[in-house]
Image (cartoon, coloured by chain):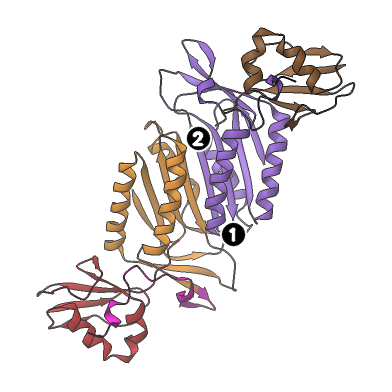
Chain colours: A brown, B red, C purple, D orange
Amino acid sequence: MVRVEFLGPIQKAPLELEITNLSELAIVLQKDSEMSEWLKNCAVAVNDTLVSSLYVDLKDGDRVSLLPPVCGG
Amino acid sequence: MVRVEFLGPIQKAPLELEITNLSELAIVLQKDSEMSEWLKNCAVAVNDTLVSSLYVDLKDGDRVSLLPPVCGG
Amino acid sequence: MLYLYNGALEVTAILKEWYEQEAGSNYGAYIPFVGTVRNEDGIEGLSFDIYEPILESWFKEWQERAKARGAVIKMAHSRGDVMLHESSYIAAVFSPKRRVALEFIDEFVEDFKASAPIWKYDLKGGKRIYALERSTAIKGSGILGEKS
Amino acid sequence: MLYLYNGALEVTAILKEWYEQEAGSNYGAYIPFVGTVRNEDGIEGLSFDIYEPILESWFKEWQERAKARGAVIKMAHSRGDVMLHESSYIAAVFSPKRRVALEFIDEFVEDFKASAPIWKYDLKGGKRIYALERSTAIKGSGILGEKS
């Protein structure tokens, strides 16, 4: 199982999904209309490391985080 | 009389000179061998306003200051 | 050298603590940047969420960049609510000479704004409203929205 | 907002005083620059001469530049001796937004170094030695050396 967490202002409970890469996650989340705006502007981290493409394999126990636009300070 | 002051590290007592412009001051100071290095790197102020050329008239009571290279902070 | 606090920062105490920490380190320049909540758009204050694991790894990279330039970087940020005219953010660089410090504080603060995983909310009429228009998508954002 | 002190600056007290002076002014960014005496070349400390009339007019021009950009500039400097690891110089800018503050503190500190009528001496073996090699001739220097 891969755990998917939605950070900051995204009001969505974590998901536990049987997926093996980020492309599969994209397909799942693109079916969720509440997520469509967030998918355009969120960054993605796997086990707390930011990734820059969907070509990332996932294994059991991995954690994916979605990070919406930031504004510290 | 025009008063000429030497600021900061220049170890020289003020002068009181009968001069009518900065060119005359240059001639006087260029005769002083102790001043030759300072004349190359000093800025000049007349009545506490920096000037950028010798074409400045002086009148009785004016005050000329020589400012050697600076290093605040 | 990353300090997170609940609520507003005690600016004077933090600036003093950092100055004293480095008092014997022979740095010639100390430049803090202090960010304070401004009264605009009728807000009562701001509120912040922080995702600490990624903030820590982001900050660690900046510590290494500072070290490579002979400098030290420190940062403090608030979690939760910070009201008008209170401060929520301090970053500071120490370096032997001024040029590195002046350039580093600018680079650090700009990347902080663009990359640090912190989310800002306006406090307005008792509500906590995500400040989307003032926020910046982290570099590489949007990959999950691509059609595969 | 130009403060001259005999001997070392009380950094924490000055940073606190300035922060509190502007606490209600609605500035979002406060950037102090603190200059501290470094241990190098075997010096025991530094010493400073200041020509105050021109320092004041130079600073007044910078206050006007700050005002034109919606900012405020403050500065403190030591007269006389400042020993190792003590601080002799603080400049600080306050502005509504960060970009102006980050740019202004850099411009101000660089022009301060190039133009402010302050002379620095190394304190070494009980002597006060003018730091000519680290000093900068003010713009327009040298006119009295020209042959007329």
Residue closer to the observer: D129 or B24: B24
Look at mark 1 in the image and give the residue it sits on.
C96
Quarter of the rendering containing residue D111: bottom left
Across and down, in percent, residue D44 comes to 55, 70
- Is residue D6 at least partly visible in the picture? no
- The amino acid sitting under disc 1 is Pro
- Is residue C102 at least partly visible in the picture? yes
Q: Hey, which residue is sitting farthest right in the picture?
A: A60
Q: Hey, which residue is sitting farthest front in the picture?
A: C148
Look at mark 2 in the image and give the residue it sits on.
C35
Residue C122, placed above or below residue D53: above
Residue range corresponding to the magenta coloring: D123-148
Q: Chain of mark 1?
A: C
Could you tell me which residue is drawn at 34 percent across and 67 percent down? D139
Q: Tell me, yes or no, whether the highlighted magenta stretch contains residue D134.
A: yes
Q: Tell me, yes or no, whether the highlighted magenta stretch contains residue B54.
A: no
Figure quadrant of the C terminus of chain D: bottom left
Could you tell me which residue is drawn at 58 percent across and 48 percent down? C93
- Same chain under badges 2 and 1? The reply is yes
Residue density around tag 1, few if under 14, some if 14–19, many if 20 or more, within 10 Å:
many
Q: Earlier in the sequence, mark 2 or mark 1?
A: 2
